[in-house]
Amino acid sequence: MIWIIIGVLALIAGMLVRHRIASHVSRPTLTDEDLRRIEAGLPVEIDEPLDLQAIREEEQEFWSESWDEPDEPLA
């Protein structure tokens, strides 16, 4: 019975500490306007369009490769 009381008190104390910390920490907000300004400032250089067929082939080659098994089994 005493362990239940100690557990409940510990849970309440943890919730209070978390609430106290969260109330002092301000979370930054990022608006749509902020995102547009960031995107406008990014240098974008597209020399040529993407070759989707070459991308697919590379992906297929990557996934078709055999993977080395670990030396030791995980415990």
Image: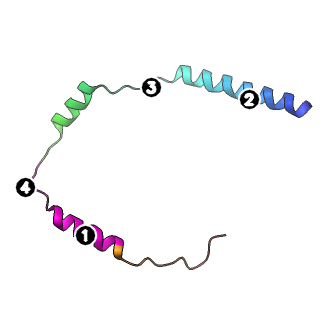
The secondary structure type at the circle numbered 1 is helix
Mark closer to the observer (2, 3):
2
- Which residue is identified by label 4? 47
Q: Amino acid at mark 4?
A: Asp
Tell me if 69 is positioned left or right of 50 in this view: right
Query: Along the horizontal axis of the image, is 13 left or right of 19?
Result: right
- Circle on res. 58: 1
Q: Residue at coordinates 21% horizontally, 64% vertically from top-left?
A: 55
Residue found at the very far right of the displayed protein: 1
The percent coordinates of residue 57 (x first, y second) are: 23, 70
Between 66 and 44, the one nearer to me in the picture: 66
Left-right relation of 66 to 69: left
For the stretch drawn in magenta, the main secondary structure is helix
Vertical arrangement, residue 67 with respect to residue 17, above or below: below
Is tag 4's residue or tag 1's residue first in the polypeptide sequence? 4
Q: Nearer the viewer, residue 20 or 61?
A: 61
Q: Earlier in the sequence, mark 3 or mark 4?
A: 3
- Taking depth in this image into account, of 7 and 53 the one nearest to the observer is 53
Residue at the disc numbered 2:
11
Q: Which residues are magenta?
A: 45-63
Residue 61 colored in magenta in the image:
yes
